[in-house]
Image: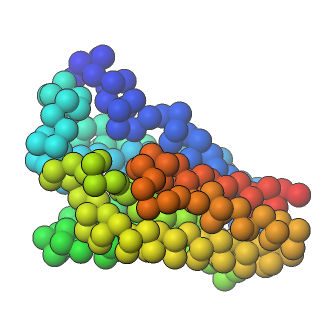
Amino acid sequence: MSLKALPAYLNERFPPVAYGILVALFFGSATLVATVIGEGSSIHWAGAAVVFLVFFHLRVFDEHKDYEGDVRAYPDRVLSRGDITLTDLKVLGALAIAAELGLSLWIGERALIAWAATLAFTLLMAKEFFIGKWLNRHLVVYAISHNPVVACLAVYSWACTDATWSNAFMAYVAMVSLGSLAFEVGRKFRLPSEEIEGVESYTSALGRGAAMGFLWTVLHLTAVALGILLLLMGDIVWIAALPVLPALFLVKPASPAKKVELGATLALFLSMLISGIVAVV
């Protein structure tokens, strides 16, 4: 492995700063909400590193699954050029999983159990639940079937606190899962001129109108879940901000991919930020 190849690969496919911000918002909001709802008082912040590493090993799994198609569609990528190889990524993925195990052991028994369940689900994702050919023909089902990994990581975040389990925490799980689904759809949303041959998108699979309707539905459900969460935490002031989530997504049928992706990303980040702020104050 070239020493220069790894930073280039990470910047291209797993930018550490962007993922660091995502993990900070995700783990921070999840644990703060968990301690409020479950009356906890401590958080084991090493769990944030585990969540970060899980996202990385998911990227490694995806690179292996998508390699043949990506080489054709994106020949200029670092991996496609051979500057870094699948074997290199396999080693890095194994090291990430080993670190996740060690940190979870250190954090405690319930974190270890939650991590093991998360790992098991990611392994099923890597195998595409053994129905990959069928899933690849049904893009919406594909996204929904893979989305529970977000719920697994939310539960793992709870396991990194001393809070008792409360079913009310499921409102947070629903919010972040729906927000992540909107983000996933938003990043594969393109104009006809932006479509790439051999690369699936929701707009090519569903048609732009249906894809937009699906995205709007998921985004509004995210706002509803956030509203329920805020009510359960006893806050009504921030509920007035809920219309901001759909408002971030005021796009027209001719909006370019980057604008759609940005709206979905901001909606996810804002929902986590609001829930974390409410938990603190």
Which corner quadrant of the image does residue 202 belong to?
bottom left
Q: Quadrant of the N terminus?
A: top left
Work out whether residue 101 can be spotted.
Answer: no
Q: Quadrant of the C terminus?
A: bottom right
Residue 64 higher or lower than 203, as above or below: above
Residue 126 in percent (x, y) is at 25, 60
The residue closer to the viewer here, 156 or 168, is 168
Q: Name the residue rendered at 19%, 24% in the picture.
A: 83
Q: Name the residue rendered at 29%, 59% in the picture.
A: 201
Residue 197 in percent (x, y) is at 16, 50
Which corner quadrant of the image does residue 139 belong to?
bottom left
Query: Going by the image, does 60 lie left or right of 45?
Result: left
Query: Going by the image, does 80 lie left or right of 100?
Result: left
Query: Going by the image, does 8 lie left or right of 45?
Result: left
Q: Name the residue rendered at 41%, 50% in the picture.
A: 257
Work out whether residue 188 can be spotted.
Answer: yes
Q: Name the residue rendered at 80%, 71% in the picture.
A: 239
Residue 205 in percent (x, y) is at 25, 68
